[in-house]
Image (spheres, rainbow, N blue to C red):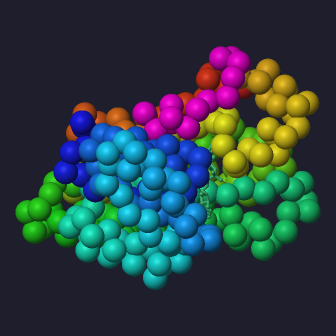
């Protein structure tokens, strides 16, 4: 168990990749705070799955784009589990429109969740990590952002999402350097096509799905659990010397597209 005595927050972990990461971190011994938005009980499935693997977790509702709710998320984490060691910025949204027709309100919403959210959570987590180190109750921390291959790879009709993930790329690089003196590491995971609710439009359209599979050298969707394995490594002490990078997990999609 690589994460015994660690405490982790995973944003947007009622579903999809976030849920798989929350379960995996709990399996590795971390106490987990399952952040969610939406109906009460939305995170119950994640909590039940964590309990089933013998893990410890609570659910806290916090819209990551709201600074007060983000601060409350940290406060509730520390008051329940006594500390914070790992913050995973997983919450994200996307809507697709031709660039010339992209509604401003949707651009703002995507940036609020995908950029301001990780900024606020990383900032609040870093403050807590530094406070713990100063109180000799810890040595640094881990910030892991779930970015996307679209931090590098263009996708027509998805301009706001691609721009938001590009912003996360530079947020990570910048704060990794700034926070390194505090032994806080900051990394991105850049998934390719992972089978989750965010891809419902592609999954529901056989033509689109076939075209997508042709773009993936390994010829299949990735699994949330595969992303979770990478997150568990980055969260662990084994990754103490790893910071400021994006780790793509995409079945070779970026290489085939010739990006980078
Ligand atoms: N599935 C993929 O193929 C894929 C590929 C690349 C990157 N990603 C990224 O992975 C992350 C998780 O996506 P997913 O595929 O699991 O989809 P998902 O829709 O299942 O997960 C997103 C989660 O974020 C939550 N959320 C939305 N707005 C929020 C807010 N304001 N505050 C807190 N939580 C909020 C949702 O309720 C949901 O639980 C996203 O950042 C996404 O961009 C996914």
Where is 3 relative to 214, above or below? below
Closer-to-camera residue (94/170): 94
The reply, left or right, for residue 45 in relation to residue 104 is left
The reply, left or right, for residue 122 in relation to residue 222 is left
Does residue 196 appear in this view?
yes
Closer-to-camera residue (187/64): 64
Where is 130 relative to 210, above or below? below
User: Which of the 4 image quarters holds residue 106?
Assistant: bottom right
Looking at the picture, how far across and down is residue 29, in whole percent? Answer: 27, 44
Asked whether 226 falls inside the magenta stretch, the response is yes
Closer-to-camera residue (50/25): 50
Q: Which residue is at 43% across, 33% downward?
A: 229
Where is 170 relative to 203, above or below? below
The reply, left or right, for residue 15 in relation to residue 209 is left
Looking at the picture, how far across and down is residue 2, in whole percent? Answer: 24, 37
Q: In which quadrant will I find the C terminus?
A: top right
Q: Which residue is at 82% across, 31% downward?
A: 209
Looking at the picture, how far across and down is residue 22, in whole percent? Answer: 43, 49
Q: In which quadrant will I find the N terminus?
A: top left
Q: Which residues are magenta?
A: 217-229
Looking at the picture, how far across and down is residue 220, in whole percent? Answer: 69, 23
Does residue 167 appear in this view?
no
Q: Single out the residue that lies furthest toward the left.
A: 136
Asked whether 22 falls inside the magenta stretch, the response is no
């Amino acid at each position: 168990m690589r994460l015994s005595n660690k405490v982790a927050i995973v944003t947007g972990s009622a579903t999809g990749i976030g849920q798989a990461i929350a379960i995996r971190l709990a399996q590795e011994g971390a106490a987990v705070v399952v952040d969610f938005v939406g109906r009460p009980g939305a995170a119950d499935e994640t909590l039940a799955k964590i309990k089933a693997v013998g893990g410890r977790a609570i659910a806290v509702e916090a819209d990551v784009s709201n600074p007060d709710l983000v601060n409350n998320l940290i406060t509730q984490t520390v008051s329940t589990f006594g500390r914070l060691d790992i913050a995973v910025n997983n919450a994200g949204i996307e809507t697709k429109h031709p660039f010339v027709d992209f509604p401003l309100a949707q651009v703002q919403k995507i940036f609020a969740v995908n950029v301001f959210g990780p900024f606020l959570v990383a900032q609040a987590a870093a403050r807590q990590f530094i406070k713990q180190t100063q109180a000799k109750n810890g040595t640094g921390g881990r910030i892991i952002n779930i970015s996307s291959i679209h931090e590098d790879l263009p996708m027509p009709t998805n301009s706001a999402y691609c721009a938001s993930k590009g912003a996360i790329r530079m947020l990570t690089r910048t704060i990794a350097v700034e926070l390194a003196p505090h032994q806080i590491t900051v990394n991105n995971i850049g998934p390719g096509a992972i089978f989750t609710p965010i891809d419902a439009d592609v999954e529901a359209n056989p033509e689109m799905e076939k075209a997508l599979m042709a773009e993936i050298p390994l010829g299949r969707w990735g699994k949330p659990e595969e992303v979770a394995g990478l997150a568990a490594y980055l969260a662990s002490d084994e990754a103490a010397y790893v910071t400021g990078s994006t780790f793509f997990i995409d079945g070779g999609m970026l290489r085939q597209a010739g990006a980078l």
